């Protein structure tokens, strides 16, 4: 499957491209959210053995990421009708941050992810970023190889730390005035 960036046209064989990569529009936002939630739900289910109830809180962040940097947000759309992938990027001065990137499970391994990433790299070029980063899954050869193709090299394994608090239990009474 081939895609072009913001440019519908014929592919090298003279056929209409099935998947077009273009910038996100306001009306896409809820579908982009669904694609991210669905894709990461599938991925995390394969990794963890159980499906999270709402992957990354239902990917609500899409709306504010698009408001913050609309030029850095891209979708892959099939037949002008179905959003099958998305990539969000942001440029902070000379620093470019890529991610998340997601392609619906049944559309993976057809180069759509690379076409989305290429669009974000063009966005970084437009903004003349000099340092670019992406956070990814260090145990996945696919992810490492994919980003490596675009010149990203692993820097460090990061400890992801969390603390779960049970706020439902009644708090012990505290002594007053002691
Ligand atoms: C990561 C993701 C976006 C990639 O999208 P995709 O459309 O499947 O990727 P592409 O088909 O463009 O490219 C995948 C490349 O990885 C290669 N690859 C696949 N499995 C591989 C493996 N085990 N080892 C090395 N390379 C591998 C493929 O061969 C392909 O490269 P090629 O075109 O040179 O053959 C997609 O798998 C996804 O949405 N995953 C779930 C969400 C996620 O993890 N997002 C990224 C978070 S950082």
Image (cartoon, rainbow, N blue to C red):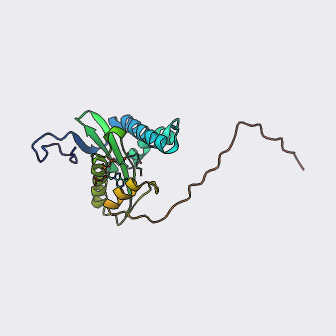
Q: In this view, does 61 lie to the left or right of 73?
A: right
Q: In which quarter of the image is residue 154?
A: bottom left
Rendered residue at 59%/54% (across/down): 161
Rendered residue at 71%/36% (across/down): 168
Q: Where is residue 163 in the image (x, y as percent from the top left)?
A: 64, 49
Q: In this view, does 32 lie to the left or right of 22?
A: right
Rendered residue at 81%/41% (across/down): 172
Q: In this view, does 4 lie to the left or right of 66?
A: left
Q: In which quarter of the image is residue 85?
A: top left
The furthest residue to the right: 178
Q: Please give the count of numbered marks on the rendered protein.
A: 0
The furthest residue to the left: 14
Residue 104 visible (yes or no)? no
Quarter of the picture containing the N terminus is top left
In the foreground, 77 or 110: 110
Q: Position of residue 118 (x, y in %)?
A: 28, 54
Rendered residue at 14%/39% (across/down): 16
Q: Position of residue 8 (x, y in %)?
A: 17, 42
Residue 107 visible (yes or no)? yes
Q: Position of residue 110 (x, y in %)?
A: 27, 45
């Amino acid at each position: 499957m081939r895609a072009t960036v913001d440019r519908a046209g014929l592919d090298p064989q003279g056929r209409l491209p099935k998947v077009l990569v273009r910038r996100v529009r306001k009306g896409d936002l809820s579908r982009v959210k669904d694609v991210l939630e669905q894709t990461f739900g599938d991925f995390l289910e394969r990794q963890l053995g159980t499906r999270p109830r709402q992957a990354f809180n239902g990917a609500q962040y899409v709306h504010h990421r698009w408001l913050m940097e609309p030029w850095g947000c891209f979708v892959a759309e099939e037949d002008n009708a179905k959003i099958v992938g998305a990539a969000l990027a942001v440029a902070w001065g000379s620093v470019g941050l890529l991610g998340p990137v997601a392609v619906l499970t049944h559309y993976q391994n057809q180069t759509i992810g690379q076409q989305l990433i290429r669009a974000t790299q063009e966005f970084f070029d437009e903004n003349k970023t000099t340092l670019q980063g992406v956070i990814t899954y260090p145990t996945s050869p696919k992810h490492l190889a994919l980003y490596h193709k675009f010149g990203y090299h692993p820097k460090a394994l990061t400890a992801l730390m969390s603390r779960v608090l049970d706020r439902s239990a009644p708090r012990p009474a505290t002594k007053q005035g002691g």
